[in-house]
């Protein structure tokens, strides 16, 4: 686990861009944080570095938005999910097992169905900015965290 202090929104964008450059087919990024903590900002910059030209919005009512870039991007917002079983109705397991990148906002809600390997990013408010806590699950994600925190 590594912590990065974010003193401005631009720092969130920089990390999101760098993260997008390090991702691989099948990568899963889990974002956790209060409303307005920077989850969508992180997703937008990550998507841009994946070559996604579309405007990224949080898919609160549709649960998942799909985007094309150098790799497919599947952006989930599970805030309104009643239970993790509902995710199977939208083919969650197929998205997770694909060659695309999955970004899951509010991932703590569906923690019981997450794959064994993923990168958890918690965004927390602090008095003078925000903190980003990176917790890797699996070797590939440990390497990404090392690269992000150099």
Image (tube, rainbow, N blue to C red):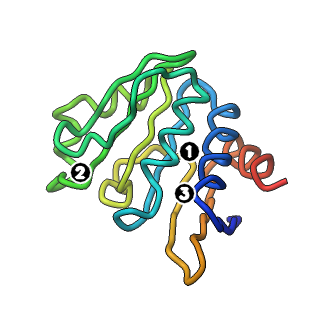
Tell me residue 140's x, y (percent): 70, 40
Circle 1 SS class: loop
Cα gap from disc 2 to disc 3, whole angstroms: 19 Å
Cα gap from disc 3 to disc 1, whole angstroms: 13 Å
Write down the residue under mark 3: 121
Tell me residue 77's x, y (percent): 30, 46
Q: Earlier in the sequence, mark 1 or mark 2?
A: 2
Residue plotted at (54% across, 57% down): 121
Placement of the N terminus among the 4 image quadrants: bottom right
Disc marking residue 117 = 1
Residue 110, quarter of picture = bottom left
Circle 2 SS class: helix
Pick the residue in front: 139 or 45. Answer: 45
Pick the residue in front: 68 or 112. Answer: 68
Circle 3 SS class: strand
Residue plotted at (18% across, 53% down): 80
Write down the residue under mark 2: 84
């Amino acid at each position: 686990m590594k912590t990065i202090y974010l003193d401005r929104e631009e720092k969130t964008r920089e990390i999101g861009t760098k993260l997008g450059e390090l991702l691989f087919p099948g990568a899963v990024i889990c974002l956790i944080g209060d409303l307005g903590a920077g989850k969508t900002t992180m997703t937008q910059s990550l998507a841009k570095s994946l070559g996604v030209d579309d405007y990224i919005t949080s898919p609160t009512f549709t649960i998942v938005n799909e985007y094309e870039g150098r790799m497919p991007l599947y952006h989930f917002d599970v805030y309104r999910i009643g239970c993790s079983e509902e995710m199977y109705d939208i083919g969650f397991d197929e998205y997770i097992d694909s060659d695309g990148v999955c970004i899951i906002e509010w991932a703590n809600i569906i923690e019981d169905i997450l794959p064994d390997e993923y990168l958890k990013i918690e965004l927390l408010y602090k008095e003078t900015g925000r903190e980003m806590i990176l917790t890797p699950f699996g070797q590939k994600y440990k390497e990404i965290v090392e690269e992000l925190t150099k």
